[in-house]
Image (spheres, grey):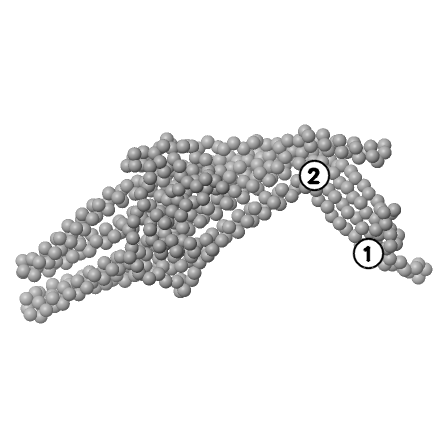
Amino acid sequence: MTTRRVLRWQAALVAGALASGCAVGPDYQRPSAPVPAAYKEATVAGGATWVPATPADTFERGEWWRMFNDEELNRLVAQVEGANQTLAASLAAYRQAQATVSEARAAWFPTAALSGNLTRGGGPSVKERNGGSLQVDGNWVPDLWGRVARSVEGSRASAEASAADVAGARLSIQSELATDYFSLREADAEIALLGRSIEGYERALQITRNRYTAGIAPKTDLLQAETQLATTRADLAAVRADRARFEHAIAVLVGKAPGDFALAEAPWSQNVPAVPLGLPSTLLQRRPDIASAERQVVAANAQIGIARSAWYPQFTLGASIGNNPSTLADVFSVSTALWSIGLSVAQTVFDAGAIRARVTGAEAGRDAAVARYRQTVLVAFQSVEDQLASARALAEQAELRRQASDSADQAEQQILNRYRAGQLGYTDVVSAQASALSARRALVQVAVNRQIAAIALIQALGGGWERIETP
């Protein structure tokens, strides 16, 4: 058989194998998940129409924090992208996943290697001479059974899951920063509130001390006034410590050492953005953790095809061209060149069930990924329902707390007037002042809790309210 006929035969064999090749293993289908028709806790908003979740993490997350109308918060969140180290690690992991995709794709193409050497030798009866060799070897393993295709599919899905993880990390960091920021501003409000109360208690202590010195009030009144002032000062110290911790947490989130970061006291905007109608049906599908879990199912499904491909033979097309001349001058001589081309096949005939075990393991891994995906969806629904319930309850509490604070303020003033008129003892004054201060602090706390609940709801829904089309 001539060389030309051998080449034609090998080329026909490879072409026929490629034409009949296919990707083994199951084609991916998005798993079903339990999806309710509407949010149970969204009744205050007139209900919401729910649609089957399809991860859309490629949508840009809107700058949701701007809805709170706080320029200082906007400035801080802008620093997260380039400075937060947790986000930087997630971005690096995504770049690593992208490199894995490129590596998997490279298996589709032939490989070539160049080798060569130079020698000089001789002996007592042999004249010294130079020698050498130069050879190029090439190999190509055609993807007859889709092993490489499944590898690329799985790697790409893993990279997409990593991209979703980056989006999730970014959203989590932004939410944590906003929560810490408003908690710090609430601490500022409490510090101002306690400061005003301390000033009033100091004046009351001085009046009581004068009355005690004049023999008008008993010593118990003086002791009660001193106790109340000391307790309120202790509360102020505790709130200042809380503020410092929030400030330190914000520093780390924006990539700065706490010692090099400070936030001055500033007015607190208690704005709470409202959730528009129809929000659940359009935005829960944008949760990055759901998208990541779904991509992981794709990757696990691809592993089944990779494992099954081991049951089929592997063809390798090899070729080489080189030169092994007798003198160095002939290394690049065409007349002394040698070449070869060939096709090899390898097939596992006995492995004691190893391939079957790998296939079974891959199928179990896919089933586990499906279960994790469905659990992620369930937890997402739970999170949204929880935050909707919290937002509704806190809105109701805010009005009640306001009423309680107004009534406590009036009661405090009336009891203080009656005490000055000698109609009540100082114990009644202390009790009324403590109740009024507690009501004021509760009003401040419910205000920040409403903002934190709004942030948590935004996070549960996967980002900002605005749905931006996929690039």
Specify whether 400 is left or right of 425: right
Where does label 2 land, which residue? 141
The mark that comes first in sequence, 2 or 1, is 1
Q: Position of residue 62 (x, y in %)?
A: 41, 45
Specify whether 95 is left or right of 62: right
- Residue 11: give its label: none
Please name the amino acid that badge 2 sits on: Val
Closest to the observer, 445 or 213: 445
The image shows residue 324, relative to residue 355, as above or below, that is below
Dot 2, crowdedness within 10 Å: few (<14), some or many (≥20)?
A: some
Specify whether 354 is left or right of 409: right
The image shows residue 244, relative to residue 305, as above or below, that is below
Q: What is the secondary structure assignment of the residue under circle 1? A: strand
Residue located 41% across and 64% down the image: 260
Residue located 12% across and 58% down the image: 429
Closest to the observer, 451 or 144: 451
Q: What is the secondary structure assignment of the residue under circle 2? A: loop
Q: Position of residue 146 (x, y in %)?
A: 63, 35
Where does label 1 land, which residue? 118
For the view shown, which residue lies furthest in the bottom direction? 213
